[in-house]
Amino acid sequence: MKLTGRMPQTGPLRRRPGTSAVGTVALCCVLGCIVAAIAVPLAPKASSQPLTAPATIDAMMEQLSRMPGLSARYREEKRIALLAVPLVDEGTIHFTPPAKLVRHCLRPERVSVLIEGSRLTMGGPSGRESVDLGSNPVLRSFVEGFVHLLAGDRAELERSNRIRYEPAADGSWRVSLEPRQRAVRHFIRYVRVCGRGLVIERLDVAETSGDESVTTFTNVDTSRRYTRAEISRIFRVPGR
């Protein structure tokens, strides 16, 4: 069913004026999938040892490959050039292998984005809409790139993104992902994650419009194992 009525003005279904439907879905993937993917190996861990950045991007990817599942809370600030005050939404992120991701925006409006295999589904009070990733090679490449990140598959990830990892002696680090495909770069300039030791501090998604999304995380559980009942209840999208 197509979405009807008013589209949410905040959260993952927000559409930027002049943006195509494909671009809107791509941004949903950025804000839904990237957040989950990048947050995976970076959960805070209690330790008396000095914070040390992972030595290489391969070390980070190796941690990703061992993850059984993920749950986290997020807070996103959407900084729009024409607005003096950022738009804020909050909710939860969930992942279960091999390729099932969901983002539930809880405030200010309940909207969900689910990626399951080759299908992306969005839903909320206005209804529900699904997109077959196989029918859109650009969107499919973009989404699958972050599924490969979750799987810890660097070779496949680099097919769709240029990766730059910058560790520092003080334990801080930065990871930058730049889309390779021109059609994706039409909407997204880069994704940048900054942190210290094994703790994520900031994730930026810069759009070509000049807008920027800044996301922070709490209650990150990188050892989450979902039961069948939880998968049925959590990995779903509301709407008619």
Image (tube, grey):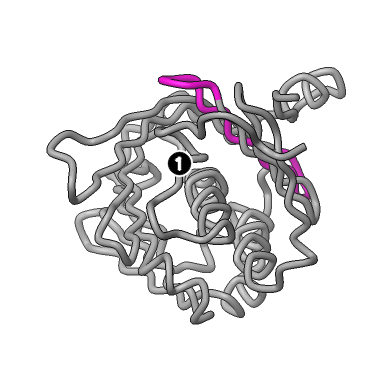
Q: Is residue 51 above or below residue 126?
A: below
Task: Inspect this view and state whether residue 38 appears.
Answer: no
- 214 vs 81, left or right, is right
The residue that label 1 is drawn on is 14
Residue at 52% across / 62% down in the picture? 59
| Of 30 and 38, the residue lying toward us | 30
Q: Residue at x 41, y 58 (%)?
A: 54
Is residue 142 left or right of 226 when viewed as pictured? Answer: left
Asked whether 171 or 182 is in front, the reply is 182
Q: Is residue 125 left or right of residue 214?
A: right
Tell me where the magenta segment starts and ends, as one range.
Answer: 96-110
Check the image and report above or below for 201 versus 111.
below
Furthest-front residue in this view = 5
Decide: is 185 above or below 64: below
Q: Residue furthest right?
A: 228
Q: Secondary structure at mark 1?
A: loop
Residue flagged by tag 1: what amino acid is it? Arg
Q: Position of residue 57 (x, y in %)?
A: 47, 67
The residue that appears at 17% across and 34% down in the rendered structure is: 85
Q: Main secondary structure of the magenta part?
A: strand
Is 105 contained in the magenta span?
A: yes
Q: Residue at x 51, y 34 (%)?
A: 7
Q: Position of residue 77 (x, y in %)?
A: 30, 37
Q: Which one is nearer the viewer's eye here, 45 or 22?
A: 22
Q: Position of residue 145 (x, y in %)?
A: 62, 66
Residue 103 visible in this rendered orientation of the protein: yes
Residue 44 in the magenta stretch? The answer is: no
* Crowding near the residue tagged with mark 1, few <14, some 14–19, many ≥20 C-alpha atoms within 10 Å: some
| Quadrant showing the C terminus | top right
